[in-house]
Image (cartoon, grey):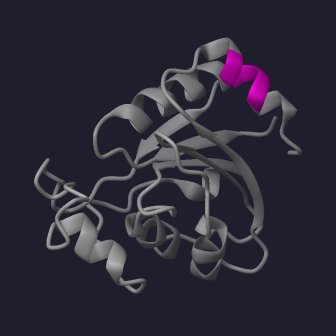
Amino acid sequence: MSKALVAFFSASGSTRKLANTLAEAIGADTYEIKPATPYTGKDLNWNNSQSRSSVEMADINSRPALADTSAQIANYDTIFLGFPIWWYVAPHIINSFLESYDFAGKTIVLFATSGGSGFGETLNQLKPSCADSVRWVVGQVFRGRTDKATLSNWAKSLPL
């Protein structure tokens, strides 16, 4: 496997745990995608149509501001991109991240955490945020804890 980066957004910590275990399993570096304004529990209340996450996800053009854009994307061939599934797609902060860097010629492997949803329209909503030359690999949605050996085997099975 070429030099890899595990970039991830985690609002509650579940995706962070998975991403760190994946990075350890495959010997990759990590980069946490952080919002300029961190999400609170109240912001993440999907039962409230006025919560921050609900308002952002209702607007397909929403691009939450990033805390920084210091990821050294040019140093990597493969980026494992992780996030929780929100409303059947990636949170729009993932589009913010993708639009902040040049991913031309890179391979992006999507992985996500969810209690029950699949990727839905995630790929279709992310593709316009990158150059046409990006090679996309739709990986897997993980539910709950996943051990290092399982993640290592999963990564080795990908068409990279």
Image quarter (top left, top right, bottom left or bottom right) of the C terminus: top right
Residue 92 vertical placement versus 22 (above, below): below
Q: Quarter of the image for the N terminus: give it.
A: top right
Q: Is residue 132 magenta?
A: no
Front-most of residues 105 and 87? 87
Please state which of residues 137 and 54 is positioned toward the viewer in this rendering: 54
Residue 30, image x and y in percent?
49, 37
When asked about the image quadrant of residue 25, the answer is: top right
149 relative position to 59: left or right: right
Q: Residue at x 43, y 63 (%)?
A: 87
Vertical position of residue 140 compared to residue 37: above or below:
above
Q: On screen, 118 above or below 50? A: above
Q: Where residue 57 appears, x then y in whole percent?
A: 35, 73
- Name the magenta segment's main secondary structure: helix
Residue for point 20% across, 72% down: 49
Q: Is residue 65 visible?
A: yes
Q: Residue at x 38, y 52 (%)?
A: 33
- Residue 89 image point, x, y percent: 51, 63
Task: Please provide percent x and percent y for residue 36.
Answer: 20, 62
Magenta segment range? 150-154
